[in-house]
Amino acid sequence: MALKIYISGEYFDKEDAKISVYDHGLLYGDGVFEGMRSYAGKVFRIKEHLVRLWESAHAICLQIPMTPDEVAKAIQQTLELNGIKDGYIRLVVTRGAGTLGLDPNLTSNPRVIIITDRITLYPKEFYDNGLEIVTASTIRNHPQALSGRIKSLNYLNNILAKLEGLKAGCVEALMLNHKGDVAECTADNIFLVKNEAVLTPPIDAGILAGITRAAVIDLAKASGRHVREMTLSRHDVYTADECFLTGSAAEIVPVVKVDNRQIGTGKPGPVTKDLLARFRRETGA
Ligand code: PMP
């Protein structure tokens, strides 16, 4: 059976789920989105995802034409219609169709799109053996040009860095910010473990306030670990005992090599493994 896609109150087969070529989401990347996970039919931290979506929309003066409750219900319904329990949810809100000019005031009918699909997890070996990543020369957007906290439909900054990673044979790439400090990866936040403490760049490093990042900080604190959101340099990464990435799709994935330097023992470390086990207990995965 074809997957059903929700677009603004209606369901379409995947092949027929289409929006206008005049939609500014397509023409200018003008819109916002969320990527979420469901475990046993329940969306992980849905409230936090919807708050972030509404904040992203507010920041770009985009009025979402539904309430958070209505969107939550539509997500649940789409999951059920497609018989998806453990899945990935892509929620997109476009600016709507307008003219060929930039002016958002000349657009109408923002589209609310819900795609639910089976999860495409990183292969098991990434979790067992850890990833190798490289630092991209493309820096994260300057926060005074575009806040990293807005999860917008324009991901070119991240895609350019991803292309650099892929060229080096890596599925993720580390991005620095305009100050040269560690920011995040192209679609994941980054954590280090040093002398038992769990370290991660602060939100004002120009990063996305990841929902998984927040969940991992909560889990680490609840398990009695010392957590610090602090400015981190590449030197801190190279000399860390452990390194891992977090994201809704990736969950928690160990990193064992950065820019050709082995991190810690070169194997996924005990704190990373413990946090992943706790995360999986919480999600029931
Ligand atoms: N940073 C960026 C740039 C992202 O796109 C994402 C989401 N894929 C993340 C971090 C992780 O955020 P979350 O845990 O909310 O998925």
Image (spheres, grey):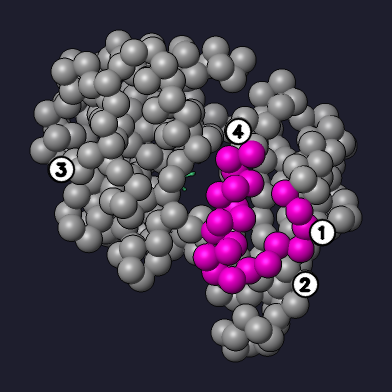
Read off the residue under disc 2. Answer: 109
**Could you classify mark 1 by the number of other residues whose Cα lies within 10 Å: few (under 14), some (14-19), or many (20 or more)?**
some
- Spatial distance from mark 4 to mark 3, Cα to Cα? 30 Å
Which is more N-terminal, label 3 or label 2? Answer: 2
User: Mark 4 or mark 3, which is nearer to you?
Assistant: 4
Amino acid type of disc 3?
Ser
User: Mark 2 or mark 4, which is nearer to you?
Assistant: 4
- Spatial distance from mark 1 to mark 4, Cα to Cα? 23 Å
Which is more N-terminal, label 3 or label 1? Answer: 1
Secondary structure of residue under mark 4: loop
Residue at image point 15% right, 41% down = 234
Q: Image quadrant of residue 131?
A: top left
In contact (CB < 8 Å): disc 4 and disc 3 = no
In the image, 64: left or right of 200? right
Magenta region includes residue 62:
yes
- Spatial distance from mark 2 to mark 1, Cα to Cα? 9 Å
In front: 4, or 94?
94
Secondary structure of residue under mark 3: loop
**Could you classify mark 2 by the number of other residues whose Cα lies within 10 Å: few (under 14), some (14-19), or many (20 or more)?**
some
- Up-down relation of residue 185 to residue 151 (above or below): above
Read off the residue under disc 1. Answer: 8
Which is more N-terminal, label 3 or label 4? Answer: 4
User: Mark 1 or mark 4, which is nearer to you?
Assistant: 4
In contact (CB < 8 Å): disc 1 and disc 4 = no
Q: Image quadrant of residue 132?
A: top left
- Spatial distance from mark 2 to mark 3, Cα to Cα? 44 Å
In the image, 134: left or right of 11? left
Q: What's the magenta region?
A: 47-68
Instruction: Identify the mark at residue 45; answer none if there is no mark.
Output: 4
Amino acid type of disc 2?
Asn
- Spatial distance from mark 2 to mark 4, Cα to Cα? 28 Å
**Residue 109 spot, x, y in % from top left:** 77, 72
